[in-house]
Amino acid sequence: MSGFVGVPDAQVRFEPRHSLDLGLTLAPLGSGPWLRREGEAIWRATRTPAGPATMKIQHHLGSIDVLAWGPGAEWAVAQAPALCGEHDDDTGFVPLHPLVARLHREIRGIRMPRSHAVFEALVPAVILQQVTSEEGVASYRHLVNALGEVSPGPVALKLPPSPQVLAGTPYWAFHRFGIERRRADVIIRAARSAKRLEETVTMDRPSAYQRMLAFPGIGPWTAAKVAMAALGDADAVPIGDYHLPHSIGYAFEGTARSTDQRMLELLEPYRGHRARVIRLITTAGIGAPRFGPKKPLRSIIDR
């Protein structure tokens, strides 16, 4: 394989069934100490059922090369096609709206990833609850840098903190990451039952959502965010998002302000593929005009 950087513990090459843009496809996994792009390659540190792993994923002459290091390397390469959207089935997706049709033509290669790492997807989603994206992303990056371990392999990445570490971290220790007690408690409780969350990868979609929503502090928005990254749900809709209804309303009918209810009505013709439409619109950077000052960063002292 090309791009030799040291002998990997496992490797695989596969030919994607569809056009594949790795950066856009893996965008729901975020970027930071655990995932970064280096030229045409994407490096990712993750925890697998077999242990930690570092992955290098890149295009090579029409194929995808995946190299992996660490105890979880074999598991990681076995799941790499799913991670890259090979299980994503867009059969039946008909871009009816002219804008959706244009974006579908112009933005090629977005697939729905399936990381099979539910707890890893949950923690940043909880941190992003009811805060600005900038604040939430910064908080999670600080958390990973402080509590994550160095990943195996030839590059300097950090593994997302383990459930064991987060379950044993007192709520007040999260304050230094800008996370108040409410969100800290959600993370701690979820960490203590991480195994039950990970079981959702083997469940049918309704049962997986039911399991996630049974956890205190995990609502429809958080569950949808997790499903879009970990479960490959092409129909996930993050209900309760501050900006998304306005973006969808603006894209479909030019309105500057909309509601969750109207967003669901506009997306209904795409049921089964609503997350696909959402990702096309957000990837294109389409958003409603914003009025008023930006939401300020908050102090979480004594919260």
Image (cartoon, helix red, strand yellow):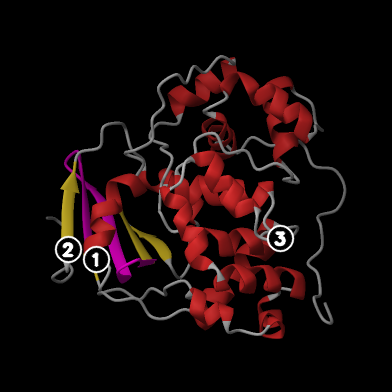
* Badge number at residue 217: 3
Q: Determine the CA span between mark 3 and mark 2.
A: 38 Å
Q: Earlier in the sequence, mark 1 or mark 2?
A: 2
**Which residue: 60% across, 39% down?**
285
Which residues fall within the magenta stretch?
Answer: 47-67
Q: Which residue matches tag 1?
A: 73
Amino acid of disc 3: Gly
Q: Determine the CA span between mark 1 and mark 2.
A: 6 Å
**Residue 273 seen in the figure:** yes
The residue lying toward the viewer, choosing from 73 and 178, is: 73
The answer to if 247 sits in the magenta stretch is no
The answer to if 61 sits in the magenta stretch is yes
Q: Quadrant of the C terminus?
A: bottom right
Q: Secondary structure at mark 2?
A: strand
Amino acid of disc 2: Ala
The residue lying toward the viewer, choosing from 294 and 81, is: 81
Q: Are marks 3 and 2 in contact (CB under 8 Å)?
A: no
Q: Residue 31, position in %: x, y?
A: 48, 60
- Examine the rendered structure and indicate whether residue 232 appears above or below residue 120: above
Q: Earlier in the sequence, mark 3 or mark 2?
A: 2
Q: Are marks 1 and 2 in contact (CB under 8 Å)?
A: yes
**Residue 139 seen in the figure:** no
- Examine the rendered structure and indicate whether residue 223 appears above or below residue 73: above
Q: Main secondary structure of the magenta part?
A: strand
Q: Secondary structure at mark 3?
A: loop
